[in-house]
Amino acid sequence: MKRVYNFSAGPAILPEEVLMEAASEMLDYHNSGMSVMEMSHRSKIYQGIIDEAEKDLRTLLNIPDNYKVLFLQGGATVQFSMVPLNLLKHGKADYIISGHWAKKAYEEAKKYGEIRKVASSEDKMFSYIPNVKQMVFDQEADYVFMTDNNTIYGTKFYEYPDTGSIPLVNDASSSFLSEPMDVSKFGMIFAGAQKNVGPAGTVIVIIREDLITKELPAYTPIMLRYDIQAENGSMYNTPPTYGIYLCGKVFKWLLNMGGLEAIQKRNIQKANMLYDYLDQSKMFFGTVEKKSRSLMNVCFKSTSQELDEKFVKEAKEHGFDNLKGHRSVGGMRASIYNAMPVEGVKALVDFMREFEKNN
Ligand SMILES: *Cc1c(COP(=O)(O)O)cnc(C)c1O
C-alpha cells in the first residue's frame, strides 16, 4: 500500500488515524456484531454515536447553549436553498459575493426573495475579500450571507462584517474547524463535511434557536425545514449515519490534538511554508491578494501554462496528487486542510524548489 500526499480541494484528505480506526471497526463496532453502516439509526448504540459527535463538536467550538447542532444531508449546496426558505421572514437578504460558492448561493436565494449583492470581488476574479468596513447593510434584511473561505480562488475573511442585529450566516465549508471561531457572532454557520471533517454528503448546521421558526409556507419541503430537523434530532428520516460517525471521529482527533488553537497553529505554519516559498520564487507566484490569503487552499501559477501542466504531471508522478487548479482558474491549487501533515507541505515545497531549479 502506498498513500499519496492528497492536495484535493474536496472530497479531501482525512486523518490516517481516523481511517485506520474506522477500518478496525468496520465489521464489528464495539461488540455490536455489525458495521455502523448496517445499524439502525434508531438504535441506542447509534444514538450514542450521534450524541457524542454533537457533544465533541460543542466542546471544540464552544457552542453556546442557545444554538442547535444539526447533521443534515445534501451537502453545503442544499443550504443555499434551505437558508432563504427558512430565514427569509420579510423577503430581503444581503449577500457578500466573494467567490464561486457565494455566487451560487446568491443565485439560488434570488428565487425566494429580494436578494441584494452588498459587495463583490468578481471584478478581479475573486482574488481578494471585499472590505468589510465599507459594507452597508439593509436594515430590513433578514440575514447577511457570507462565505468564510473561498475554496476555488483561495481567499479568506480575516475580519467579519459587523452586521449589528442582522443575523450573519456563514458558509464555512472549507475552513470549518481549521481555527477557533466565535459562534456567538453568527446567526448560523454551516459546513459541508468533505473539505475538513468527513465524507461528502453530510452537512453540519449550527443555528441560533430564535432563527428557527414554524411559520413557513405549507409547501416548504419537509426535509428542508430547520424546525422539523431540530425537533427530530436530525433524524426526521434516516440521517447519513456513517458520515456522522466519521465526523465524530475527526472531532475526537482534533480534541486529542489539543483543539482548535493547536490545529490553527499548525495550519498557519503549513500555509506560511508554502506562501514564503512562493514569495521568493522566480517561477511560481500566488494568485490572490496577500492580505486575503487562505490557509486552506493555496492557489498559485508558474510563468506559463505549459509549465503549469508539466508541474502538475511531474508532481503526480512523485506522489503529490490533485494539484491542478479549478477549471475556472487554471494554474495550481494545493489544498492543505487539517489532515495534511506538515511533512506533506514540506515535501511539496522541496519538490517545487527542485522543479524550479530544473526548468
Ligand atoms: C465545496 C463547497 C460547497 C459545496 O459543497 P457540496 O457539499 O458539494 O454541496 C459550498 N460552499 C463552499 C465554500 C465549498 O467549499
Image (tube, rainbow, N blue to C red):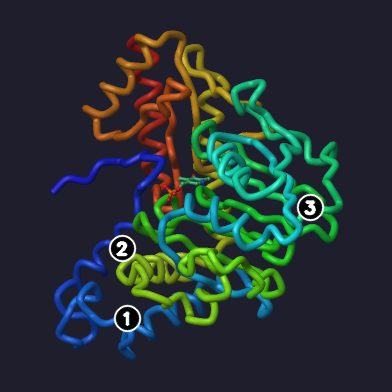
Mark 1, mark 3: which one is toward the viewer? 3
| Labels 1 and 3 touching (C-beta < 8 A) | no
**Which residue is drawn at the image coordinates 54% and 44% (left, top)?**
269
As helix, strand or loop, the secondary structure at mark 2 comes to helix
Residue 142 in picture, x, y percent from top left: 75, 57
Q: Earlier in the sequence, mark 2 or mark 3?
A: 2
Residue 344, placed above or below residue 54: above
Residue 172, placed above or below residue 48: above
Residue 83 in picture, x, y percent from top left: 60, 57
Write down the residue under mark 2.
17
Quarter holding residue 31: bottom left
Residue type of the residue flagged with mark 1: His
Q: Could you tell whether 32 is left or right of 194 in the image?
A: left
- Label 2 vs label 3: CA separation? 45 Å
Write down the residue under mark 3.
141
As helix, strand or loop, the secondary structure at mark 1 comes to loop
Residue 331 in picture, x, y percent from top left: 43, 21
Residue 147 in picture, x, y percent from top left: 61, 46
Write down the residue under mark 1.
41
Q: Earlier in the sequence, mark 2 or mark 1?
A: 2
**Which residue is drawn at the image coordinates 64% and 36% (left, top)?**
98
| Labels 2 and 1 touching (C-beta < 8 A) | no
